[in-house]
Image: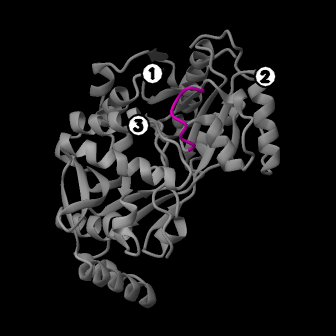
Amino acid sequence: MTVTVPPAVDAGGTGVEAALSPATLDHPLVRHCPHLYGSPRWLRVEAQAHPGDAFYTWVRGADMTAFAPAYGFGAADNPWPFARPDLFAADVTGTGTGHEALLPGFTVGGRRPGHSRFHTGGPAWQRAEALTLLLGTAAEHAAGRGASCLAALYCSPQDGDLAKAFRAHGGVRLPSHGTNVLGLPGDGRPDWLASLPRKQRAKEKADLRRLEEAGVRFEVSPLREPDLDRIVPLELGLYSKYGHDYARDEAVALHRAYLDHLGHDALLVRARRDGADIGFVSLVRHGSRAWIRQAGFHPEACEGLPVYFGAALHEPIAWAYRNGVRCLDLSISSDAVKRRRGARTLARDAWFIPLTDAARRHLHRLAEGVGETASTVPAVPAGAVPTVPATEKASS
């Protein structure tokens, strides 16, 4: 593929950085990003927690700028099906194994479930061209590094500019997991409860009574270094319960990166009983919004009790009202359970740009299997040069 600079953005061209630079972190487009996963401190978290293959692509025009990070995955990387391209494709298409043609690959726009972030600035009428140039540059660079695909796993289907840009480079659309967002009405937890249907409101109140009668207490406090030895085993146990492998070293590294870069905005919701921690939820604040991230629970100590809902919903909601947070991001999975508690599920699409003939054939077969019509633009030639974990699936 030959990338040309559209006239709308031809003043500065494109650039690819192999490492996260101070100039990128301080650029107004990044520095003022309102979304956690596009912010400078989150880019630092990713760079520290996952120091493998990564690159950062820029478009710099007279009036329009665009930026996106990209993170590499190979067969030896953490087998997390919500981020690694081959396992993600297997999961969303229900086709099991046999997706080796998608590795190695890069996820552009991030690596976190629910959100693929593409920073843009400038006139709206230039945005599609800027994104097209951004993705073309990133695809050529990824191909030059031996990648089989460039993927963005959590894109809003309402972003027509982004879809147009992917199609311009032979992008193939696949299903994705929706992400859940809970807006908080009124001034306190009673207002949230009052917003629920009567039967659901009664259930939530009954859950709170059961937790209180069982002596389960919750507290929110900043994450501390000694916490890691207690929470990581609980986190890995929850993943294992639902059939997911997760590398312990990567789990530890991510929490440690929280400590190093998020400060007092990296919080733990602790569930305690008889003086011991029996569960936790990671809570990350960014402005007036907070993200519910990792979770873990002691199976015997929590058995028969709605500890998950206390730690992942009730206590974060109470904390949010006290601290001026108006929206909680509840990530992917258990959509119906979260909607019953007031959340909205926002649809997401996954887009893959094949960079090899094998990846293109494989993606087209997958697209046909799920009823998609794939683009027929040729793949980038291999020699060309220049994203809460799934959480507790509790019953309603």
Residue where numbered disc 1 is placed: 52
Whole-angstrom CA distance, mark 2 to mark 3, is 35 Å
**Crowdedness near tag 1: few (<14), some (14–19) or many (≥20) residues, C-alpha within 10 Å:** some
* Residue 192 magenta-highlighted: no
> With respect to residue 222, does 270 lie above or below?
below
The residue type indicated by label 1 comes to: Gly
Q: Residue at x 68, y 29 (%)?
A: 102
* Residue 77 magenta-highlighted: yes
Q: Position of residue 396 (x, y in %)?
A: 49, 76
Residue where numbered disc 2 is placed: 357
Q: Is residue 379 left or right of residue 332?
A: right
Whole-angstrom CA distance, mark 1 to mark 3, is 16 Å
Between marks 2 and 1 in the image, the one whose residue lies nearer the viewer? 1
Q: Earlier in the sequence, mark 1 or mark 3?
A: 1
Residue 373 visible, this angle: no
Residue 69 visible, this angle: yes
**Crowdedness near tag 3: few (<14), some (14–19) or many (≥20) residues, C-alpha within 10 Å:** few
> Which element carries disc 2, helix, strand or loop?
helix
The residue type indicated by label 2 comes to: Asp
Between marks 1 and 3 in the image, the one whose residue lies nearer the viewer? 3
> With respect to residue 197, does 9 lie above or below?
above
Range of residues picked out in magenta = 75-81
The image quadrant that residue 319 belongs to is bottom left
Residue where numbered disc 3 is placed: 248
Q: Residue at x 73, y 23 (%)?
A: 379
Q: Earlier in the sequence, mark 2 or mark 3?
A: 3
Q: Position of residue 223 (x, y in %)?
A: 21, 47
SS assignment for the magenta stretch, majority: loop
Q: Position of residue 77 (x, y in %)?
A: 52, 29
Q: Position of residue 201 (x, y in %)?
A: 38, 85
